[in-house]
Image: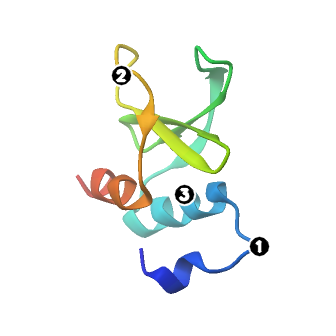
Amino acid sequence: MAEAELLNPAQTVKDLVQQVADKVGVVYMPKGGMSDEGKKLFSFGSTLSLYIEQGVVFGRTSKADAFLPISLDELERRGLQ
C-alpha cells in the first residue's frame, strides 16, 4: 500500500485491512467464532483467518497453523493469489 494511504490517523487497522480487501477484490468479514485465544475472527478471502490485537494483524491459513503477525503487504499479496 502507498504510504499516503496509511497516514489518516482516524483510520483503524480494521479499516486498513478492509481497504486491502477492496483493492484485491476479496471479502473481509467477521466469522462466527473466536480463536483459541478468545479473539474475534475475520475471514479474508477464502483462505485466511485473521484477528487484530493492539494494532497488529495476525493470520493463519488453516486450523492446524498458528496465528502469526502478517503485514498489509502480505495480505495484499495473498489476496491476489
Looking at the rendered structure, which numbered label has been put on residue 62?
2
Quick check: 64 above or below 41?
above
Q: Farthest residue in the right direction?
A: 10
Residue appearing at x 40%, y 21% in the figure = 66
Answer few, some or many: residues within 10 Å of disc 2's Cα (few below 14, many 20 plus, some between 14 and 19): few
Per the image, the residue denoted by label 1 is: 10
Q: Tell me the residue that label 3 is attached to.
A: 17
Give how far apart the Cα atoms at labels 1 and 3 are. Answer: 14 Å
Determine the secondary structure under disc 3. helix
- Numbered mark located on residue 77 in the image: none
- Residue 9, by quadrant, is bottom right
Residue type at mark 1: give it. Ala
Tell me the residue at 54%/80% (across/down).
Answer: 5
Amino acid type at circle 3 is: Val
Q: Vertically, is 38 above or below 8?
A: above
Image location (x, y in percent) of residue 41: 60, 31
CA distance for labels 2 and 1 = 32 Å
Q: Are marks 3 and 2 in contact (CB under 8 Å)?
A: no
At label 2, the amino acid type is Ser
Sequence-first disc among 1 and 3: 1
Q: How many marks?
A: 3
Say whether disc 2 or disc 1 marks the residue closer to the N-terminus.
1
